[in-house]
Amino acid sequence: MTPNATDAVSLLAALLGQPAERQRLIVRYLRGDMEPSLLAAFEEQLLDDAALLDEVETEKVLRQGLRESPQALTAKTSSRWWLPLSFAAGCLLGALLITSLRSPPLTLPLAQRVAVAQLPATRGDEIPAEAELTIAAGTQQLVLRIPATNEPGPFRLRIRADETLLGAFDGLRPDDSGRFDVLVALPASNTTQLTVELEAWRDDAWRQRPTRTLLVRTVSAPPMNSTH
């Protein structure tokens, strides 16, 4: 299927439910490097989500403050937010402040149902080694972060679990970091072997690129460490 507004909204909801991914989205938005479909979904969310809008405004002020003196930053923000003294001394990162301002009860339930997997980059036509991911029981969806090849594209993806097609994405373009973020629903299984098939449009034809595999293991308790 071609990426549409529904796909982008689902992906956005999954990423916003993860505190680290939420922060990454905010930074990408302020840098202006979101792909159009995700950007449209993000800006639509800003209209209805006062907490997200507040986080974006806070991050914007913090980023501006890093280019100015600490005193100027404090003066700008004192009317809306209390900033720790350590920040005025230049010792507190903006990401830590954003985390402290966020309301955990709104994000934790979704974060427990969604996992994020970054697949390793490869060179040329090198065959990628199988990646592994350990997730907690109850995880229902997976955001796959897939590196693109060094080609103009467009690209298309097919993600399968055995013979079951979990997702088909056509007309994809990588983001500024050179990868695709796609959302798939996970089968109810303790062990799932995912196959990621990537094709690139080149010389007026679809060209198959090395297939990737990801072994997803489910554990009964949240994992202490996971390997991507």
Image (cartoon, grey):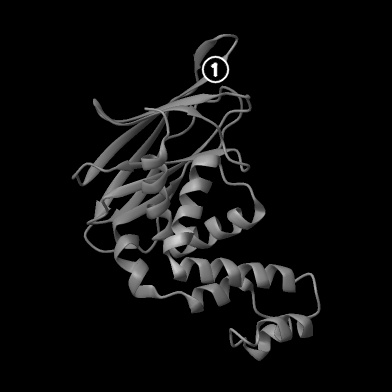
Side (left or right) of 86 relative to 137 = right
Side (left or right) of 110 relative to 188 = right
To which residue does mark 1 refer? 201
Quarter of the image for residue 1 reads top left
The 10 Å Cα crowd at callout 1, few under 14, some 14 to 19, many 20 or more, is: some
Work out whether residue 67 or residue 179 is closer to the camera in this orientation and state it.
Answer: 67
State whether residue 184 is above or below residue 195. Answer: below
Q: Which amino acid type is shown beneath numbered disc 1?
A: Trp
Image x and y of residue 96, in percent: 56, 75
Asked if one can make out residue 105 in the rendered structure from this viewpoint, the answer is: yes
Image x and y of residue 115, in percent: 36, 53
Q: Secondary structure at mark 1?
A: strand
State whether residue 60 is above or below residue 87. Answer: above
State whether residue 89 is above or below residue 147. Answer: below
Image x and y of residue 100, in percent: 50, 79
Work out whether residue 224 or residue 4 is closer to the camera in this orientation and state it.
Answer: 4
